[in-house]
Amino acid sequence: MGNTQWVKIFSYLQTTWTEAKNSIFQTTDGGFVIAGDKKDTAQLSKSYLLKLDANGDTLWSKIFDLQGVHNYAEYAVETSDGSIVLTGSSFDSLLIIRMYLLKTDQNGTMQWIKYFQDYTSGCEVHQTTDKGFIIVGGKLQTQTNWDFYLVKTDSMGNLISTGLSTIFQTSEQVIVYPNPFVNNVSILINKSNYKEANISIYNLWGQTLYTEQKNTLHVSYSQTIDLSFLSSGIYFIDVILDGERTVKKLVKE
């Protein structure tokens, strides 16, 4: 009904620390876990977890001194076995930021931690049906340019696969994705100020199945093409930019 049941104000560990609360979830025992980061007297940020009972009273708190000058906890969830997984970032400088995935037991004691050097920050994590974890985050390309990504791990935090949106950061002039595809395929012409683009799709026998021409484009061009009418198999996409040809193989599932 929106009526206040209780209010708690937390000032714990060291009163000189300032803190941020970035994530909260309810545990299966009816309590709550808060994840965030705290700055110590030297203004260094450390990740923390705070466990509360159903009335908001503190049961335990943990601070994690991880890699990097600073580390930040962004998101935590409870796993199927009652443990806690936490993701965030450890930070040395704008050029050295790494994502981490940390698992604790029910009492907040760290069981393992994994660092992912090629990624920037874990923003959210969830357990998957195979007991592994899926993390979504952001990767810093420049001070004003970020990519997003998905990272899939097994139950021990070991990397299985990644889906980093680097397609728009590549030097390739023609990008085709996804490949393999099901019904739709997207074409990105990663070039500006060209006079003419001719796009064709043909099969193994050289029969043209799709064709399109674009003229005088001053910016990068992208388009999604519905190829649901094609049967499963191998095709080719032929893109000619001002006479310069790029041919890529397409696979329809």
Image: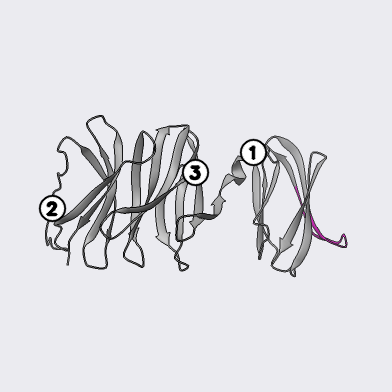
In-image side of 126 versus 8 (left or right): right
Query: Which residue is label 1 attached to?
Result: 219
Left or right: 108, with 94 as reference point: left
Disc 3 marks which residue? 119
| Mark 3 Cα-neighbour bin, 10 Å: few <14, some 14–19, many ≥20 | many
Query: Is residue 108 in sight in this rendering?
Result: yes
- Amino acid type of disc 2? Lys
Residue denoted by label 2: 8
Per the rendered image, the range of residues in magenta is 200-213
- Report the label total: 3
From the image, give the main secondary structure of the stretch colored magenta: strand
| Three-letter amino acid code at the position of disc 3 | Tyr
Q: Secondary structure at mark 1?
A: loop
Sequence order check, earlier mark of 1 and 3 = 3
Nearer-N-terminus badge (1/2): 2
Dot in front, 3 or 2: 3
Using the image, determine if residue 125 lies above or below residue 168: below
Neighbours of disc 2 within 10 Å: few (<14), some (14-19), many (20+): few
- The three-letter code of the residue at mark 1 reads Val
Residue at left offset 25%, top offset 29%: 42
Q: Earlier in the sequence, mark 3 or mark 2?
A: 2
Q: Is 221 positioned to the left or the right of 5 in the image?
A: right
Residue 149 position within the rendered picture, expressed as x and y whole percent measured from the top left: 51, 50
Residue shown at the point (34%, 42%) measured from the top left: 72
